[in-house]
Amino acid sequence: MKIVIVGAGEVGFHIASHLTHENKEVVVIDKDADALRRVSDNLDVQVVQGSGSSPVVLEEAGILNAEIILAVTDSDEANLVACLVSNIISPTTKKLARVRDADFDKYHEHFREHAPHIDTIINPEIEVVKTITSMMSVPGAVDVGEFADGRIKFIGIYLDKNSRLAGVKLAELPDKIDNNAKPLIAAIVREDELIIPGGSDRLMPGDLVYFISEEEKLSDTMAAFDKHHQPIHRALIVGAGNIGYRLAGSLEDKAIHCKIIDKNADRCAWLAEGLNKAVVLCGDGSDQVLLAEENVQDMDVVITLTSDEETNILASLLATRMGAKKSITRISKFSYFPLMKAIGIEQVVSPRLSAINTILQHIRRGNVLSAISIKGEQAEVMEALALETSGIVDKPLKKIGFPKGTILAGIIRQGDIIIPTGDSIVKPDDRIIIFAHRKAIPKIEKILAVKLEYF
């Protein structure tokens, strides 16, 4: 598979990194020589300096032989034009574009149906709001993914040192928890190392534990990990940019009492006109006096969304120290992610990471319905469709040679959810959930493309 990426910024760089680990042929286009140098110095990809909207540059990059073009520069207009020119030169190339400006929201369908015929439009702001609301729906979780239209949850939590499951072997879990809570442990991250656990592995304090649970059993499952459900009634948003505005509107729709703080007086006046119920405050969200005046200790969650991540980190730490029950922090620099837990911040969101997760599901071969990248680029969870031509249907899972580092974590059949065992059998038209270590993804993709989708 050949993929052309227009834009060598954070999103372009990390998508390219993700794909090169899977031995895909990647070409990155950018005007910025320094950005391209970073790509070529760190990744085994071809780079082309120039405008991604230039037909000459696109042809030099091999657009005629590319299956996919990803237009992910910081300019919506550049991304749209790159797709338009690609559509003229190579109409069969699948086109994905990052488009952030809300002014374009109502034209997404038009861009799909008419020129430039963009197959998938990704708005990172919309995606990150979805991520935040998912996190808010599962208090205590640091990572939340949804499959089967939300009926299966993929959850990441940190195991507390006082948890009753600390030190317990996975094989002993059924004896330690209620029958209503039967999570399938998909992965453990310990000291920044991703572990695909077996029955003899133990859960240790400080582990980041990823598990699969049915939605209706999630409360019982979280309780088994000593994470008790606390409904969100009051939220404070720091930062009234596009993401903050979108989130405030979403919280209003959910009848959650919301306050939003921003330094810019003109922006605050505009927000007050556009929002119905949210309380708009003009001030510094990292000001301790202001937070005290607004009773931050009564907030169920504080979400810091300014464009300055140092401000977000400070405001989150300050709010939780003053009594807010939890905080969600926007971070843009991927290099900061490993540091967050060490300084006391567990729940982190990134528009760029949300965009990457959305892009992944659209560039996978086979019948992949959705995909979530976890722990940076170390692993992925995919929801796919099993067709009757598949080599994995109609026989017990224990007799199927899945690649090392993979787990079939869930089966959805005619609306029923099955948490599989070795004796479970995948049937044609089942939707399956597969957890795969990065090294195993090419093999899983091959199964999905060649076996699940017969040519």
Image (cartoon, rainbow, N blue to C red):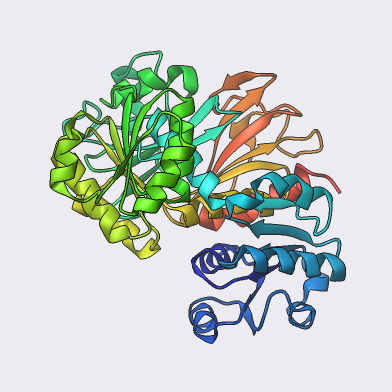
Quarter of the figure with the N terminus: bottom right
Residue in front for this viewpoint, 174 or 215: 215
Front residue of this view, candidates 91 and 192? 91
Residue 272 x/y as whole percent: 41, 39
How many numbered circles does the render carry? 0
Q: Quadrant of residue 180?
A: top left
Where is residue 143? Give x, y as percent: 40, 41
Name which residue lies at 78% across and 83% down: 56
Residue 225 visible, this angle: yes
Point 78% across, 48% down: residue: 110
Image position, residue 237 (x, y; %): 34, 41
Residue 341: image location, x then y, percent? 25, 50
**In the rendered view, would you say 41 is above or below 194?**
below
Name the residue nearer the viewer: 34 or 257: 257
Left or right: where 228 falls relative to 453: left
Can residue 122 be seen from the camera position used here? no
Is residue 28 toward the left or the right of residue 421 in the image? right
Residue at (68%, 54%) from the top-left corner? 363
Q: Which residue corresponds to the image point at 18% horizontal and 43% vertical from the top-left?
A: 290
Q: Please name whichever residue, 5 or 419, is drawn nearer the observer in this view of the structure.
A: 5
Residue 89 located left or right of residue 225: right
